[in-house]
Image: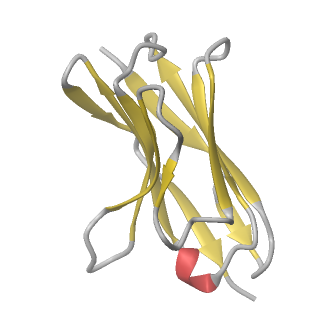
Amino acid sequence: QVQLVESGGGLVQPGGSLRLSCAASGNIVGANLMGWFRQVPGKQREPVAMLVGSEAPKYSESAKGRFTIARDNAKNTVSLQMDSLKPEDTAVYYCYVLLSERPFWGQGTQVTVSS
């Protein structure tokens, strides 16, 4: 069974940067999809950045130009580099992997952008 653990969240000022990392137990190199979602209270969980097969990374409109998703097959991880952070980026960020037609979620890591 695949388990995902996020790290790297925290408190940052507007304009700052954070790098989130998702460490996987179980090999996710062959996953069909992998990436990041985020959720704030009272709203639906929304995709932020995704890797789909060998296609170019896909980003939400708000993430384009500021966030970068990457995978490290050797370390079996997926990262999200977040630059130029804004208060509206405040949310719990979740790692997501679709493997063998089954979804796997991390427990989430809190990102708070505030002065």
Residue 38 found in image quarter:
bottom left
Residue at the front extreme of this rendering? 55
Q: Position of residue 58 (x, y in %)?
A: 47, 50
Q: Tell me if residue 105 comes above or below residue 77 in the rendering.
A: below
Instruction: Please tell me which residue is depicted at 70% across the width and 70% down the height of the picture.
Output: 11
Residue 96 as seen in the image, left or right of residue 93? left
Residue 15 found in image quarter:
bottom right
Q: Tell me if residue 112 comes above or below residue 81 in the rendering.
A: below
Residue 25 as seen in the image, left or right of residue 70? left
Instruction: Please tell me which residue is depicted at 67% across the width and 65% down the height of the picture.
Output: 65
Residue at the bottom extreme of this rendering? 115
Q: Quadrant of the N terminus?
A: top left
Q: Position of residue 41 (x, y in %)?
A: 33, 77
Q: Position of residue 104 (x, y in %)?
A: 30, 32
Residue at the left extreme of this rendering? 101
Tell which of 106 and 86 is nearer to you.
Answer: 86
Instruction: Please tell me which residue is depicted at 44% across the width and 17% down the height of the picture.
Output: 28
Instruction: Please tell me which residue is depicted at 28% across the width and 76% down the height of the picture.
Output: 43
Q: Quadrant of the C terminus?
A: bottom right
